[in-house]
Amino acid sequence: MTTERLTATSLVVCSLEEWGTVRRRIRIMVDELVAGDPLLKVLYVAPALDIPHELRHGRATGFLGPRMETVHPRVHVLRPRKWLPRFLGPAADRSLGRQVAAAVTTLGLPDPLMWVNDSSYARFALSTGWPTVYDVTDDWLLVPLAPHRAARLREDDEALLERSDAVVVCSPDLARTRGAHRDVEIIPNGVDLDLFRTPQPRPVELPPGPVAVYVGTLHEERIDVPLVVALAEARPDLQIALVGPDRLGSESSARLAAHPSIHLIGAQPYGRVPGFLQHADIVVIPHLVNRFTESLDPIKAYECQAAGRPTVATPVAGFRELGPPIVVVDRSRFIDEVARLLDETPDGSGPSQAPIDVPTWRERAEAMLDVMQRVRAGAGSS
């Protein structure tokens, strides 16, 4: 990666993603940017710790740990404390902003560029005068929320669309909705090809026998829980491993956990994810087709292509245009197609697809770097 364009620049990243072993778009691209620029310093603002929520659930000591930690000599992760719910007014946002500003001062970050993925930092980011890039990765405006939360989210989104120096989106649908009244840049997701194409041992968490694997966050707006259960009931010989964080409601989680051939593996370190895909007899993408999933550019689509295992997906954005090893079918044909592929290779020995060209995270980070450079140059000339 080019190293001269953001040299000696500080970056403040307000992210909806935790900093942890589960690596997603923002975290991965931060890693790429830091690796490519030996002088870049980053303050990564993780989702705030909600103190009232912690207290309501009897976790009175969970917020006593450090607010900021050093995860790399040039990367510091701040987890602000949210002491008040946002519906009480702007005090909660001001408090979060003050914590970020204090961390910037403590770290001595000169004239940072703001990379905003968490739109709740809209007021803070736009009040600083720092050049700002708004990165929209999911259309949370389409998710059912309490009226006050939905109104606040829309207000923050509109403010950032109007006043950010650049807006980045990851999918054509987001480009359509967010680009209706301003220019936006499309930077889709990618994959670490070396990681996903290096053979790994079979994960011990995978059950024996023919196994279908799904990798991704279990979310009510994404995964078709009734379809997963129907697949398990139609093919009792098939074990179904769901690998990823469980963000489902309690009823959906309980419904999946109650089935003997459905295994909730949970979140896994990013470096282990390829092993689950490589050792799948079949990979399944039982996604809902709705307005929210239409806005996505699923990272798992790139990972499935890189791993090369037989894959059956419902016709969701990110998968519809793909060819082998991915087969896209309507929900009504999903179970039959899974059965057909399994019956063609009953011993699970079906070959992986030959390597194909898949965009890498390094390429995507380069594209983000170009946007940031233009924003930085524009701020310098103003």
Image (spheres, rainbow, N blue to C red):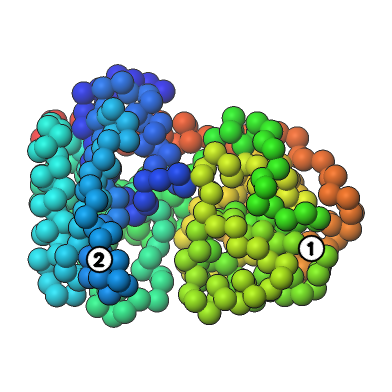
The residue wearing badge 1 is: 238
Q: Position of residue 232 (x, y in %)?
A: 74, 70
State which tag comes first along the sequence, 1 or 2.
2
Instruction: Answer yes or no: is residue 243 visible.
Output: yes
Q: Closer to the camera, 238 or 134?
A: 238
Where is the C terminus found, in terms of image quarters?
A: top left
The residue that appears at 10% across and 59% down in the rendered structure is: 94
The residue wearing badge 2 is: 60
State left or right for residue 369 relative to residue 233: left
SS of the residue at dot 2? loop
Q: In this view, does 109 lie above or below 82?
A: above
The residue that appears at 27% across and 36% down in the rendered structure is: 70
Q: Is residue 57 above or below residue 169?
A: below
* Amino acid type, mark 2: Ala
Write down the quadrant of residue 351 in the picture.
top right
Q: How crowded is mark 2: few (under 14 residues within 10 Å), some or many (20 or more)?
A: few
State left or right for residue 328 relative to residue 252: right
Where is the N terminus found, in terms of image quarters?
A: top left
State left or right for residue 124 relative to residue 182: left
Q: Is residue 240 above or below residue 113?
A: below
Write down the quadrant of residue 52 in the picture.
bottom left
Q: Which of marks 1 and 2 is in front?
A: 2
Q: Position of residue 56 (x, y in %)?
A: 27, 74
**In the rendering, which numbered label is found on residue 138?**
none
SS of the residue at dot 1? loop
The residue that appears at 41% across and 58% down in the rendered structure is: 138
Q: Residues within 10 Å of mark 1 (few under 14, many from 20)?
A: many
Instruction: Answer yes or no: is residue 370 visible.
Output: no
* Amino acid type, mark 1: Leu
Write down the quadrant of residue 229 in the picture.
bottom right
Q: Where is residue 127 in the image (x, y as percent from the top left)?
A: 10, 51
Label pair 1/2, CB-CB below 8 angstroms: no
